[in-house]
Image (cartoon, grey):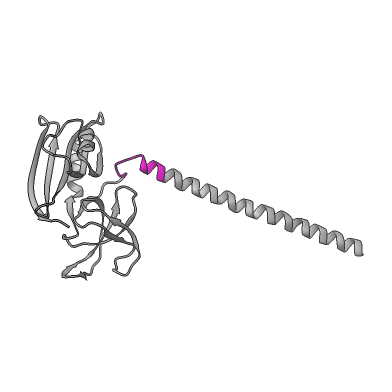
Amino acid sequence: MIDATRRDISVHIGRWWYLLIFIPWLAISCTFDHKGDKTSGSHSTRDSTHAPELHSLYIVNEDKLRLRKYPDRRSGIQSTLSYNEMVHYLDEQTDFEDQVGKYSAPWLHVQRVKDERTGWVFGHERFVQPFEDITTLREKQKAHGGHITLFNNLNRLQLNEKLGTELHSFKPGWRFSGYCCTDSTDAVVYCRFRAIHPDQKTRKWQILTCIWDATNTHTLRCDSTLLDAR
């Protein structure tokens, strides 16, 4: 009787050792699979400079603009946005307005271009403003037959490389953010961007909103404004 009981205990202990070995192995396997899927997805996103789905574009007017997790000034900060940075507007805003200093506005749901992080920004144009609506982007994409690429705060050499031409209108120190359209051969044929340059003497930002069109003898058209330097 004692031997039989010992055998039963041995069997149960054997089963428990099997579970103690198998369950952690299973958990580790699931964890690795999950990370692998996540890494694969983020890798494919980083390799592409255009979003799989088009959204209206906004541009940031404040350096270190806080991207919050929820539409609330006390919410956690996801990241900070740079002056002149392009973001996707996710077609969602609060049905109420908040007050920041002397400004009143709703919160906007946006997505960063460089890492696809989403969050909420205070939506007054002093901090962020519309740059291009979704309808126009779709029309440009359809007209040229390629896709849309976005870029943030390129320097002059980087912009020239992207366009495949030399823009002599800009001196060193300018920064450029915007989007380009490609044709069916993946060549850049149309770009709209905002160029900024700080004037150290006047403490003003010189801002140009420009259109470059390769289909029209490589023309560059810009308008000019001056704003207080941030």
Camera-side residue of 200 and 126: 200
- Tell me where the magenta segment starts and ends, as one range: 42-52
Task: State the quadrant of the N terminus.
Answer: bottom right
Tell me: residue 205, above or below residue 215: below
In the visual, does 8 lie left or right of 195? right
Measured as percent of width and height from the top left, residue 83 is found at: 22, 53
Measured as percent of width and height from the top left, residue 56 is found at: 22, 50
What residue is rendered at 14% in x and 32% in y? 214
Task: State the quadrant of the C terminus.
Answer: bottom left
Measured as percent of width and height from the top left, residue 131 is found at: 17, 50
- Residue 182 visible to the viewer: no
Tell me: residue 16, above or below residue 147: below
Q: How many marks?
A: 0
Residue 128, quarter of picture: bottom left
Residue lying farthest to the front in this orientation: 201
Tell me: residue 124, above or below residue 200: below
What residue is rendered at 54% in x and 48% in y? 32
What residue is rendered at 7% in x and 47% in y? 224
Camera-side residue of 101 and 3: 101
In the visual, does 4 lie left or right of 70? right
Residue 50, quarter of picture: top left
In the visual, does 51 lie left or right of 156? right
Residue 91, quarter of picture: bottom left
The stretch drawn in magenta includes residue 142 = no
Measured as percent of width and height from the top left, residue 31 is found at: 54, 51
What residue is rendered at 40% in x and 46% in y? 42
In the visual, does 29 lie left or right of 53? right
Camera-side residue of 99 and 84: 84
- Residue 35 visible to the viewer: yes
